[in-house]
Image (spheres, rainbow, N blue to C red):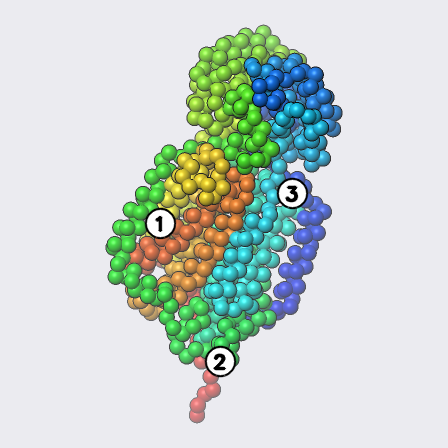
Amino acid sequence: MATLLYRLGRFSFRRRGRIAAVWLLLLILLGVGAATLMGPTSDKFSMPGTESQRALDDLDRQFPQAGGATGTIVVAAPEGGKLDPAAVAPVVKEASRIDGVTAAMDPFQTGSVSQDGRYALIQVQFDKAADEVTDEQKSAYEAVGADVEGLRIEHGGEVMGGEVEVGSTEALGVLVAAVVLVITFGSLVAAGMTLLNALIGVAVGMAGLFSLTSVIELTSTAPILALMLGLAVGIDYSLFITSRYRQYLAEGLQPEEAAGRATGTAGSAVVFAGATVVIALVGLSVVGIPFLSVMGLAAAGTVAVAVLVALTLLPAFLSFAGKKVLPRKQRHTGGHTGGHTGENGTSAEGFGFTWGRLVTKLRVPLLVVGILGLGALTLPAQDMRMALPDAGTAAEGSPAREAYDLTSEGFGEGFNGRLIAVVNGEDAQSTGAAAEKATALIKATDGILAVAPPQLNEQGTTALLAIIPEAGPTAAATEDAVHDIRDRVADIEGADVALTGATALGIDVSKKLADALPVYLLLVVGLSILLLMLVFRSILVPLKAALGFLLTVGATFGITVAIFQEGHLAGLVGVDTPGPLVSFLPILLIGILFGLAMDYEVFLVSRMREDFVHGADPQAAMVSGMGHNARVVTAAALIMTSVFGGFVLMDDPIIKSIGFALAVGVVIDAFVVRMALVPAVMSLLGRAAWWLPKPVDKALPDLDIEGEKLNRQLAAETRDKAPVSV
């Protein structure tokens, strides 16, 4: 591996113009493809094999007129007043005239008026799904009632869902990353080149992703996740290789040779670090939820592109930059410092060496304090609740949130989380009897406010029951009511009764994810441990890495629950209304964090392995690994945290929670687990850390990640070229 990447690095260095031209041409072609082929993203959640999805499919078949998106216009009279039907009628008429609206229901005819007569709900039915409703139709819907005076009018419903837009807040993360790069390298050229390389990789990956939206259905959160990860790992991978290149320059190597060796050694670590992230993301496909599979595959694609760019385009950029990647004062000395060099290109030992020696002395106290501290942070996770997001957690002041709050004020929160029971029978008689029985059983369920009379399709074989719970869609009482209803109607004979709605969907997706989690963990962790065995040729190092990850993910869940669910310090991250975590956050977080955690494991421990293989004793190898890579791992973690942190500033609650959890997870894993607990364990294990049974050693292919074979080959070539004395 190291030899192959060494040749690739030197080739890219020598052919810098061609390599840069290829990537530029690819970016242009994919950019044109994205501009011409890009289709709309979707917010549709599909959960095949669940009861709620079965009910939705039945509705599409039996009630096609109700298959499109719905909107709810909330009308309120001034405090102390009552609504006049004549004043509401023009609003209903205006809504019915919107292109694509099949019906707008007069609340005085449907009974959707509050008991005090002050509030009313106008139900609006579109002929297309929410992701197919055009921006013009949405704008017209939001403008309904704008000219009406004396009434408060808010617009809600699923039609209000829109694409998540990337704005200036995410650019703050990139700006912080740029500052960290400048401080780390002490060179604007090195910082700018590293950042530019990563941005090109992200641009290529995102352009390719959007080019595919014409043939695949992409959820609105998938591009954001791909952008988030592509930026973070792209900068980190380029940083790691550039740092090693600077080290080789400082040791006196010529730029081309330095680029080749940096790509061969640090590049090997990048390949396997990227592979663990890709495995974790692709593994999301085993869950069996289409939108989650698309999110994982989209992000995996951008990570793979980031690896390719780091291995090919970066050496070409290094060729253009030459020794300008070094601080100005070192360029005139040829970069050679004459002494020990660290990743920052200086001869003095940095903090990493001091920290490594300190860890050796305090390894037991560090392990005890670290494990107990992370364990304490994990405690809130035991109360974690999961649900699908609703408008009640949207940003205050947003149209969806205003409509949600006004509906709750006039009718109660349950009207924001209506449930639907779909009754399917063999004939009209059995369906009607089953619907009546189901209505009676549901009305008698605790937590249910009302059940509307059954609506039958033309054949009379399918009935629809609209159910209003007492509490909101994410409330525990509504979840209990869903479970009770399903238990009560399960024994109805002559028909099948399936329950759906926001709460039911959330329960079903959470259960499906919980069932898939053991399989996912076994697949992802198993493959990654096998991969790390190939990298480190050790059994204990991969196991230690996996156990350290458990501490990371537990503490991350605990902190996220404490802030987003329980509301502690919620205002600091812009959480207006605490509530359950989005259902797919745990498995998504586990997958991404595991891949990123293995990134830092590979970056840090690969140097320890490299020095150990080249003859250093285990303790010295550990200190050397920390000394050489502590600075670059610290910079990489700060960059990744800043990139993820930029997404915390977004209003969308899903993206905000994902960005926060990833940022916190990176901080915990990089600075507590990898920089403190890992070296403490390595020091404690000593030579045993690199133990591998001989049969396993023979069975595993030697990929030469640490570059031992490469060094022998280069040494032999040097001897062959040396003049022979006579």
> What amino acid type should be assigned to the residue bearing mark 3?
Thr
Q: Visible in this render: residue 481?
A: yes
- Residue found at x 58% / y 54%: 202
For marks 2 and 1, the one nearer the N-term is 2
Q: Secondary structure at mark 2?
A: loop
For marks 1 and 3, the one nearer the N-term is 3
Q: What mark, if any, has residue 333 been given in the picture?
A: 2
Q: Is residue 681 above or below residue 391?
A: below
Q: What mark, if any, has residue 548 been given in the picture?
A: 1
In the picture as drawn, the residue positioned furthest to the front comes out as 80
> What amino acid type should be assigned to the residue bearing mark 1?
Gly
Q: Is residue 488 above or below residue 135?
A: above
User: Is disc 3 surrounded by few (<14), some (14 to 19) or many (20+) residues within 10 Å?
Assistant: some
- Residue found at x 25% / y 55%: 364
- Residues tagged 3 and 2 counted as in contact (Cβ below 8 A): no
Question: Residue 541 sits in which quadrant?
Answer: bottom left
Image location (x, y in percent) of residue 302? 56, 51
Q: Secondary structure at mark 1?
A: helix
For marks 3 and 2, the one nearer the N-term is 3
Of residues 280 and 656, the one drawn nearer to the viewer in this rendering: 656
Q: Is residue 532 above or below residue 341?
A: above
Image location (x, y in percent) of residue 62? 63, 19
- Give the mark toward the camera: 3 or 2: 2
- Residue found at x 55% / y 60%: 195
- Residue found at x 36% / y 35%: 382
Image location (x, y in percent) of residue 53? 55, 27
Question: Which residue position is annotated with label 3?
Answer: 213
Of residues 726 and 274, the one drawn nearer to the viewer in this rendering: 274
User: Is disc 2 surrounded by few (<14), some (14 to 19) or many (20+) residues within 10 Å?
Assistant: few
Question: Residue 680 sits in which quadrant?
Answer: bottom left
Q: What mark, if any, has residue 558 been given in the picture?
A: none
